[in-house]
Amino acid sequence: MVSIIADRMSVLGTETAFEVLARARALEKQGRDVVHLEIGEPDFDTPKNIKEAAVKAIYNGYTHYVPAAGIPELREAIAEHISETRKIPVDPDEVVVTPGAKPIMFFAILACVNPGEEVLYPNPGFPIYESMINFVGAKPVPIPLKEENDFRLDHEYVKKKITKKTKMIILNSPENPTGGVLTKEDLKVIADCIADRDDVLVLSDEIYSRILYEGKHESIASLPGMKEKTLILDGFSKTYAMTGWRLGYGVVRKDLAQKITQLMVNSNSCTCAFIQVAGVEALKGPQDSVDKMVAEFKKRREVIVSGLNNIKGITCKKPKGAFYVFPNIRSVGMSSKEFSDYLLNEAGVAVLPGTSFGEYGEGHLRISFANSVENIKKALDRINEAVKKLKK
């Protein structure tokens, strides 16, 4: 039978987290108890004021089409927020609101990168980066993030990899899956390399910018001359525990914002109206829920890092941001995929292999600590016992 599937679909990737979640749920249906440390979403409820704003918006008639780039109130709130936090002037016309932040990755690469051009991206890194680079026929150029360098950029390596063919550089800080954070020095290396290049765009994924445990968030858009060359990706999923609401945005110069809006018109028409109203409340309302959530994540970080380092054969660096740890499991004697499967099937702990985030993730696991301290401790006990069995 002749396939009706387009060839381009063969290079489109996926997210292993949802596959592991499905397998874990299947085990639970069989009566198994599974601790879920695979999914990257806060385990907190969306703040009450945000939910109430959405309900009120429904009754106030926000149930119809709205502008493709987003309602004016939200674009203004985002422009004000980015201006204040990144210390750069932002106009509402430089903001495009999307159903989740992931479409910004999709649209930015689709709108700006041609087949054969090169895109630098972090590896290990969020898998959709590489998936979309391949999808448009561009060449993915991985930037290895190594444990010995605190999962930051190797400056000399990056300088060598930026060539005449480079069209886009993707940055993510704080980073998924490592929890690594880029410094101002790291960002300056990138900025200096493309200072005289008007044909290169930096896609700066800053979705975890508020989930930081030490220091302050640095955005490459804040460096001199970089605002016009940067597309900031951010959203509400992580900061306000709104993963299911699907609300994100991009901030980029007006000409590119218009192109991304054009892709919105051709794909989604617009982002849900009443959810956008909730986004305004999220940004302008009380921020104490965010502070409490980050404080709780910080406590959990101490528990999981200490616990993993007490397991023979596993070492774990303390992440500076996000809610993931990326422990080294090379001494266990199994590949990342083998060990993650073993932990799920034998110990009832769902985690992700480091290779779900690229080839340079081998020898590691990604473990989310967006779960209760009680469950984290239970998972640590199970992992410890599972490793002991391997040593027998």
Image: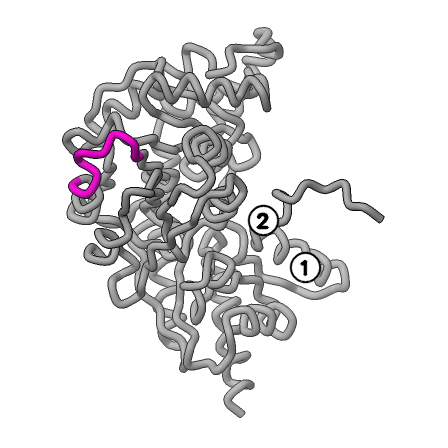
- In which quadrant is the C terminus drawn? bottom right
Residue at image point 45% right, 28% down: 111
Mark 1–mark 2 Cα distance, whole angstroms, equals 24 Å
Tell me the chief SS of the magenta region. Answer: loop
Q: Is 162 contained in the magenta span?
A: no
**Image spot of residue 1 (x, y percent):** 85, 49
Tell me which segment is drawn in magenta: 192-200
Color style of the picture: one colour
Residue 23: mark in rendering: 1
Residue at image point 22% right, 44% down: 190
Residue 244: mark in rendering: none
Tag 2 or tag 1, which sits nearer the N-term?
2
The three-letter amino acid code for the residue at tag 2 is Val
Helix, strand or loop at mark 1: helix
Whether residue 240 is visible here, answered yes or no, is: no
**Image spot of residue 266 (x, y percent):** 58, 20
**Image spot of residue 213 (x, y percent):** 28, 49
Tell which of 79 and 222 is nearer to you. 222
Which residue corresponds to mark 2? 11
